[in-house]
Amino acid sequence: MIVNRGYSGMTPIGMKFSTIAGMIGGGVQTPGFMGIGVNYISSKKFLKGDGGIRRIVWMPKELKDRVRESLGKRAEEEGIADFLDKIADETICEDIECLLEFLTQVDHPALQMEPIIK
């Protein structure tokens, strides 16, 4: 899941951006959380050791629209058809149960991957 500073709604993990930012602010390292720049999302190095863009399952619609062109191009390079349509946003779901249902329905590639945190 990716959430940007401008998004004020609830995320599927039950936290708003401000709560998430507080968990990683000041250089604090919290497993499963990290601060990134927008351009990094479509970078070839994005979470490279953990499966790359295939890990993206949810992001605010505004952010998805913002990175649509660059992330779409990156997904094509990775051979992931219609990848942006497989990423949920707040218009699709805001809770984890609904997110999992959506990911299953669209056959999101993250469902075939090993968990990062065991």
Image: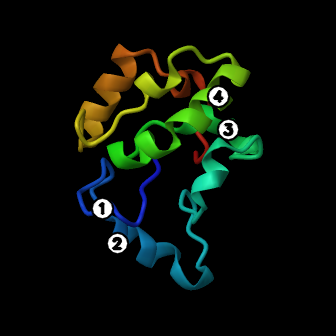
Q: Which mark is residue 19?
A: 2
**SS for dot 3:** helix
Q: Quadrant of residue 9?
A: bottom left
| Front one among 81 and 13 | 81
**SS for dot 4:** helix
> How far across and how far down the image is residue 59, in percent?
40, 45
Instruction: Assess whether mark 3 and mark 1 are in contact (beta carbons under 8 angstroms).
Output: no
Q: Which mark is residue 45?
A: none
Q: Label 4, label 2: how many angstroms apart (C-alpha)? A: 32 Å
Q: Residues within 10 Å of mark 4 (few under 14, many from 20)?
A: some
Q: Which mark is residue 15?
A: 1
Q: Residues within 10 Å of mark 3 (few under 14, many from 20)?
A: some
Q: Which residue is mark 3?
A: 52
Q: How many marks?
A: 4
| Front one among 21 and 40 | 40
User: Residue type at mark 1?
Assistant: Met
